[in-house]
């Protein structure tokens, strides 16, 4: 057995025979031409044909996966129609008297290098996109055929290796595809009946190829690098799209374990198929919004896979915890924007920085505290160090132009804290207006109800914000005066305590008196023994781990 570690970009387990895709040779000969104008006309005609092919591919993707996923190919068409791109190609043809194929390849490499050098990982991923669309134009210029065209032509590694829709797999079997890389257009054309999963030497979790793999429900792993070996063709492999592990020629113990895991996952998928698209509604008609909690942008795939209606808690502090230095505005914008785009119209509620207590970051230099749970944390850091807070708020506002983002403030104990936070938010908005940067002017603001003070002040807080979300972990800790990090207090820290449940009831009633909604985003939301209680209290939303969404929907629908 050979074990390879890559980066899991699309969850799921695949077990099957490997098929290694032979890379298509995109070498282009440089030729001197006599008639630059004729060569420019060749380029324009090829570009127009490529645009038409992308339109067909876009329509195919929209029909199968929805308009949101098809927007990628609108972006690809815009790339080809970009005046800067065309001017660079035509300028090279005119000045150097080179053939159109060579000019397109040269400009593609130039643009890809420019994208790859940017700080934003989203923009870095566009390097693959510009290569993809340019290869399409080169294929047209070279007379290669495209599978998306009306005449049944083909292009690209995946297509030429016979695994696209209407293609023919070896022996009619399904395979795990190993490749150096896959272009987004190739991934979109894969015949899912013939492909079990994907493993590539190159790529990233932010790439459109990875996003499409998640949409198609294909387990996928990227970044295996030099471990990619064409000699693996025909061998049996197991891939785990969650952990990024690849096992070539797995031993019997590994096969048995992964067959068991796969069977469990298929049982979960069976529940998904039964409940997907169904409203989270009781038999009596009481509607509850069912969202999911995430810690990283890559978790959004699990939210969609489990059919949550949105993200009720994006723990933004993990963007800080997983770095050794301050995350820049661009880095944060990239992360929030990626999730917003992937979620489409579904709500994405992002909790502002919640560092402190049990979540310490060295570069914050917070210093020692005898009782950090009651110390300098969360909103207290943000309000006393507004230069940190404003960087995050600017990133959140910028990302709000790309999806349905809301901002949630943690550890609130007073109305003044909310007003101070809103003032800094307004300063960030004013700056962005001055810089002519788009954002959602009416972005919603909410607070976490996780302290007894916030419950007592709930009526006044409700007048300041658009929603409440109850953080039951801290609310239990502070209500019962039990440090949740202390295992010896476990028997006393009862989240089912009448005191905690009464706090939850008071928050819900205050929210409803002021016409705003109230949800729960703490661990208690997934406690099925309390679902009946929460429904009786009139909870509007529950946000739980992605894997808890379907079991909870099942309980609510049977209530």
Image (tube, rainbow, N blue to C red):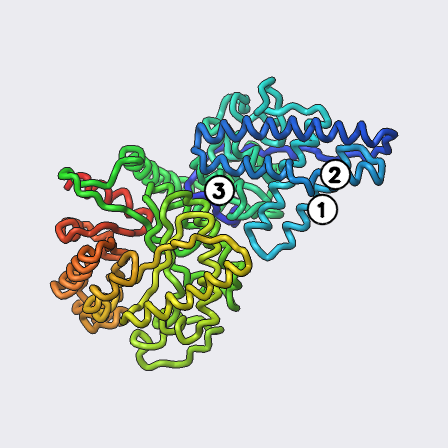
Q: Are marks 2 and 3 in contact (CB under 8 Å)?
A: no
The residue that disc 2 covers is: 89
Find the residue positioned furthest to the top.
151
| Label 3, residues with CA under 10 Å away: few <14, some 14-19, many ≥20 | many
Name the residue beneath numbered marker 3: 211
Q: Identify whether 182 is placed above or below 429.
A: above
- Residue 455 x/y as whole percent: 20, 66
Specify whether 510 is left or right of 52. left
Mark 1 highlights which residue?
A: 110
Residue 335, horizontal then vertical, whole percent:
48, 54
First in residue order: circle 1 vs circle 2: 2
Residue in the foreground of this view, choosing between 63 and 270: 63
Q: Can you tell which quarter of the image residue 302 is in?
A: top left
Residue 201 image offset from top left, x and y in percent: 59, 44
Q: Which of marks 3 and 1 is in front?
A: 1
Sequence-wise first label, 3 or 1: 1
Locate residue 138, reporting x and y percent. 70, 31
- The CA span between labels 2 and 3 is 30 Å
Q: Does any portion of residue 37 appear in the rendered image?
A: yes
In this picture, is 517 found above or below 377?
above
The structure residue drawn at horizontal position 53% and vertical position 38%, both measured from the top left corner, is 72
Front-most of residues 198 and 555: 555
Query: At x 61% / y 43%, what residue is drawn?
Result: 128
């Amino acid at each position: 057995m050979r074990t390879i570690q890559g980066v899991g970009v699309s969850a799921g387990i695949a077990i099957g025979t490997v098929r290694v895709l032979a890379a298509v040779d995109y070498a282009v000969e440089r030729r001197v031409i006599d008639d630059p104008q004729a060569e420019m006309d060749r380029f324009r005609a090829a570009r127009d044909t490529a645009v038409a092919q992308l339109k067909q591919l876009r329509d195919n993707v929209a029909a199968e996966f929805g308009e949101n996923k098809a927007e990628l190919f609108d972006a690809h068409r815009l790339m080809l129609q970009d005046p800067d791109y065309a001017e660079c190609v035509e300028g090279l043809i005119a000045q150097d008297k080179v053939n159109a194929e060579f000019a397109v390849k040269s400009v593609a490499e130039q643009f890809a290098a420019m994208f790859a050098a940017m700080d934003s990982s989203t923009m870095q991923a566009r390097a693959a996109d510009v290569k993809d669309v340019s290869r399409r134009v080169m294929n047209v210029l070279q007379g290669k055929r495209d599978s998306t065209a009306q005449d049944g032509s083909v292009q690209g590694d995946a297509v030429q290796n016979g695994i696209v829709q209407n293609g023919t797999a070896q022996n009619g079997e399904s395979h795990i595809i190993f490749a150096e890389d896959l272009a987004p257009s190739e991934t979109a054309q894969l015949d899912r009946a013939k492909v079990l999963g994907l493993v590539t030497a190159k790529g990233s979790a932010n790439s459109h190829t990875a996003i499409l793999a998640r949409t198609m429900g294909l387990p996928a792993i990227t970044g295996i690098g030099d471990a990619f070996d064409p000699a693996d063709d025909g061998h049996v492999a197991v891939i785990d799209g969650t952990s990024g592990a690849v096992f070539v020629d797995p031993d019997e113990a590994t096969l048995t374990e992964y067959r068991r895991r796969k069977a469990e996952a298929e049982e979960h998928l069976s529940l998904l198929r039964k409940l997907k698209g169904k409203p989270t509604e009781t038999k009596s008609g009481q509607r509850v919004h069912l969202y999911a909690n995430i810690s990283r942008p890559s978790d959004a795939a699990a939210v969609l896979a489990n059919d949550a209606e949105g993200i009720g808690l994006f723990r933004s502090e993990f963007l800080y915890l997983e770095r050794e230095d301050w995350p820049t505005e661009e880095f944060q914008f990239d992360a929030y924007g990626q999730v917003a785009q992937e979620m489409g119209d579904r709500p994405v509620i992002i909790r502002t920085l919640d560092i402190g207590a049990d979540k310490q970051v060295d570069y914050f230099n917070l210093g020692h505290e005898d009782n950090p749970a009651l110390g300098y944390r969360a909103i207290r850091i943000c309000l006393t160090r507004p230069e940190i807070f404003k960087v995050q708020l600017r990133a959140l506002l910028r990302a709000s132009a790309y999806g349905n983002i809301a901002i949630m403030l943690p550890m609130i104990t007073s109305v003044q804290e909310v007003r101070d936070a809103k003032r800094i938010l307004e300063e960030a908005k004013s700056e962005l207006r001055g810089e002519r940067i788009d954002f959602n002017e009416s972005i919603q603001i909410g607070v976490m109800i996780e302290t007894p003070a916030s419950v007592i002040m709930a009526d006044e807080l409700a007048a300041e914000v658009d929603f409440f979300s109850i953080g039951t972990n801290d609310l239990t800790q502070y209500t019962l005066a039990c440090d949740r990090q202390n295992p010896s207090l476990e028997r006393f820290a009862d989240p089912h305590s009448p005191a905690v449940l009464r706090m939850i009831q008071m928050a819900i009633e205050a929210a409803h008196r002021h016409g705003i909604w109230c949800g729960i985003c703490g661990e208690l939301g997934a406690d099925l023994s309390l679902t009946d209680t929460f429904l009786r209290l009139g909870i509007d939303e529950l946000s739980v781990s992605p894997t808890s969404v379907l079991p909870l929907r099942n309980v609510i629908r049977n209530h």
